[in-house]
Image: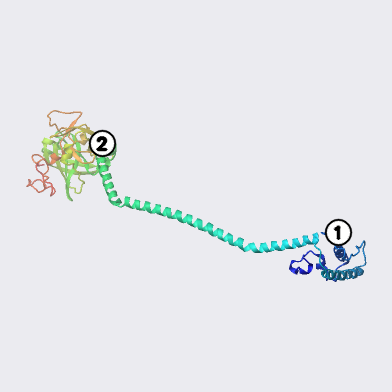
Amino acid sequence: MSQLDESPASADENDPIVGSAGDDDVDGAFAQGIAALAVDEPDAGPAGDRDDDAPAEPIPTGWVDPVADAAAARAGAAAQIEADLAASRRPVRDTRGRKRTEWRQTERARRYAARRSVRFPIFTRSIVLWMIIFAVAGLTFGASGAYWWAQFNTEVTKLREDTRDFQEQALNAQQAIDSERNAALTQIREANKPLAGFLSEALIVQLAKNFETKVYFVETLDDRGERMVGTAFAVASDKNETMMVTSLNTVRGSAIEPAPGISLKKGDDVFPATLWATDPAHDLALLRVERGDIPVMEWAGDDTQQRLLGARVFAVGGLGGNGASLVPGLVFDVSGAGIRHTAPIDMDRQGGPIINVEGKVVAVSSMVYEPGFFPTTATKFAPFVGSVCDPEGGVLSCGGGKKKKDQRTITPPANVTSTTTTPP
């Protein structure tokens, strides 16, 4: 290959002859280097391979005048050009250095072409690779999502089937729970019934103040002129007057002439009462008070009175620091004549109500009631509170309506009439 066949694009950029042939302003040192390269190439092989026809320029050995150097350089460049022109007219021998130079130029061009040719394909293959990766990932996530969506739908369908009649099941379960709860409460109440009085005894005793306005302390004189006391409680009341029950033993002195007065007391409040009716068989007496709207105590039903055996009861007195007092006792016998209990009955509590744990009146306290015709000391008998309305000997007509009374008596309230009267 000759130098004339090489294009300027593939020429060796490091070739000093091509790069400095037309430079008129080069200094002397650079001109000397060019002359040296022109005489002996660095890559030339042995002496026999060198071009003997090329002109040889002397190598300077010291510093020269710059003007002379410039002139010499121009002369050397012109000579080199002429030598190149002459060499181009004759065949060029392939030397080892020239072959190496050509190989370098060829390899450089090949590498450049290779770099230019692989840029876009590598980028294209990267896009395809990422597309494949994304496609595989999408398929994986899609398959996974489809699987879990199918599982979710299966669970939802199963849940819907299980809860289709949930409301009905919940209602049935609630009814079953309520039924079992009521049964359990009934069993507990039945089991605790013997203990109910003991469990609430302290609480009821502390609630004595709740009976302050319902029971009153009675004070009078007996048939011998000695002081007699007891308790009375209201059984009927209206706006004008109130009917109260007490023990006949307390007010017995008022049944004779001349009759002593009967006073009802509640703290500093004192007001008179009149004996209205008596029932000696049950030791009961009815007092009339010209004062209305006194609270009436609630009575227990007949069925409750008949089931008092073993129950806790409390005797209420109208005297006490709270306006009333309660003492507990146990009913250990129940008969048609009344109850027999262990609650202590002192003189100030005779004639007062005996209540159960619910606060309802079940009997009337008495110190002298003896249906067995023998005296008692530690225990006492008490007539049922229903004896107040006994048609044969009670002190009240509890069926409503009125009976004609002695003109010397005062008619009781409309719903309460006297069945046994004792003139004053």
Residue 381 x, y percent position in the rendering: 16, 32
Residue shown at the point (35%, 53%) measured from the top left? 157
**Mark 2: secondary structure:** helix
Residue indicated by mark 2: 192
Q: Which image quarter is the C terminus in? A: top left
Quarter of the image holding residue 328?
top left
- The amino acid at mark 1 is Gly
Marks 1 and 2, the one that precedes in the sequence: 1
Residue 317 x, y percent position in the rendering: 23, 38
Q: Which image quarter is the N terminus in? A: bottom right
Of badges 1 and 2, nearer the viewer stands 1
Total numbered labels? 2
- The amino acid at mark 2 is Asn
Q: Please say if 288 is above or below 227.
A: below
The CA span between labels 1 and 2 is 137 Å
Q: Residues within 10 Å of mark 2 (few under 14, many from 20)?
A: few
**Mark 1: secondary structure:** helix
**On the picture, is 9 further left or further right than 289?**
right
Residue 167 x, y percent position in the rendering: 29, 51
The residue closer to the viewer here, 353 or 292, is: 353
Quarter of the image holding residue 195?
top left
The residue closer to the viewer here, 388 or 244, is: 388
Residue indicated by mark 1: 48
Quarter of the image holding residue 89?
bottom right
